[in-house]
Image (tube, rainbow, N blue to C red):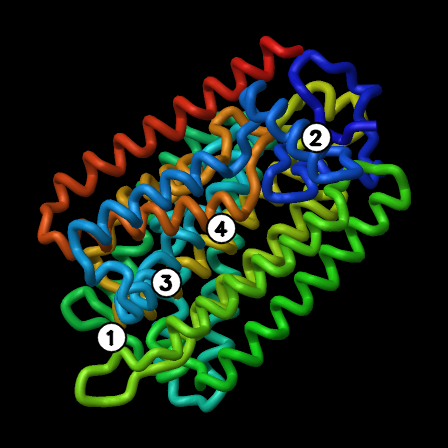
Amino acid sequence: MSSTLRPGEPAADFNPESPEPVNGDHPLATEGGGVVADSFGQYAQDWLRQVRSGQSGILPVLGGLVVLVIIFQVLSPVFLSAGNLTNLMTQGSPFVLFAMAEVFVLLLGEIDLSIGYVGGVGATVTLELAAFPHPESWWIAILAGLATATAIGFVQGILITRLKLPSFVVTLAGFLGWQGLFLYLLENNSSASGGTVGISNSILSDIVDGNLSPTAGWIVTAAVVAAFALFSWRRDHLRRRAGLSAPPAGLTILKILAAAVAGVVVVLIVNTNRGRGTVLEGMPWIVPIVLVILVAYTFLLGRTRYGRYIYAIGGNAEASRRAGISLNRVRTGAFMLAGLTAGAAGIVSASQLGSISTGLDGGTLVLDAVAAAVIGGTSLFGGRGRMIHALLGGIIIAAIANGMGLLGLSAAAQYMVTALVLVAAVTIDALSRRGNTTER
């Protein structure tokens, strides 16, 4: 029994206890279902059938990313250098986290226009508290900043769910209101200088600027690949044994090998000395931090009842209500998670810049977040998307900014190229939905 609700389906078709994941079991599967196959040939045939019906998964995103990489490398040979690729990882981290925040509400068919300044408020609280002369103030400051951003998400979620107000209007008001609070905190603080609060704690600064040792990078990567291999093999084995949708065992092995190769390539890149006159090597702290958040949110959405509820509401809210799902509670929780993640993104952004200031452009941040989520493959219509989409979309946005910076092009050109990529992503999403509707 499918655990995904589609428009027009009766509520009885939805079983929140079903072990069937709503977002597919492998990178080529889509949120509409999995692929049942006993061999590579059958798997390929099933996959080609899905592609012809418009369910292309993340392939267009990966294809677009490859095209961008080839173009920028041809125009600027520095693009694929170890130093620039490592810089791209750190540069793209705020885009990825803000996009993750937006994914939670987009899956419900909602939108949050306030996350840019919610992240700014959370970062400001963190930096101001971290300035206190206490040895452990940094983690207390981080928790306080995240709690503040989560509380903002809770307030907005309550207004949307209890008063039945449109999320667009509530979060637009939040955009203005939290911008005002953000400016107030910076302009009326003794530790602020010229509307700027600098980072006074080395640990907060090292979130982006710090690096693991080369050995530690290998250990972390090996642990991640091992965990992925164990989880993937066990999951696919149990699903095949239970007669549920799963790829053939050979493909599972190939996925594990691909993950291992990708991990080795990443570690080789970040462990290359990229310093000038000094040794600078090792994996940036932000890489495993983003990876941990990605894994946690992927598990939340794909392997928990709450995650299934989010997809169900985004697919068909009325059917979900009839199935006994508390729409208000799930929606409020999603806005709280968006606030929490925006707070984390704000702290990472402040660590990257070395400060937080009144010059923060929350409007651009939220537009980049929505663009990254949609470009990555999350649907604007709700019910379809994964956290990996935020990662891919964030990398694409960062790659455009990075590549055009290397070419010396203006911000105007960067915005226009991003707009074209966004329109292409939305077009693919619309055609995919039209293909699915026609097939049904």
**Numbered tag placed on residue 33 in the rendering:** 2
Q: CA distance from mark 4 to mark 1?
A: 27 Å
Between discs 3 and 1, the one toward the N terminus: 3
Residue 33 at x, y = what percent?
70, 30
Q: Is residue 189 visible?
A: no
Residue 325 at x, y = what percent?
76, 31
Q: Mark 3: which amino acid? A: Met
Q: Decide if residue 252 is on the left or right side of residue 172.
A: right
Between discs 4 and 1, the one toward the N terminus: 1
**Numbered tag placed on residue 31 in the rendering:** none
- Residue at 53% in and 64% down: 261
Between discs 1 and 2, the one toward the N terminus: 2
**Numbered tag placed on residue 339 in the rendering:** 4
Residue 378 at x, y = what percent?
50, 35
Between discs 4 and 2, the one toward the N terminus: 2
**Numbered tag placed on residue 89 in the rendering:** 3
Foreground mark, 4 or 2, reads 2
Which residue, given by chain and number where applicable, does mark 1 sit on?
Answer: 190
Quadrant of the drawing holding the C terminus:
top right
- Residue at 23% in and 72% down: 192
Foreground mark, 3 or 1, reads 3
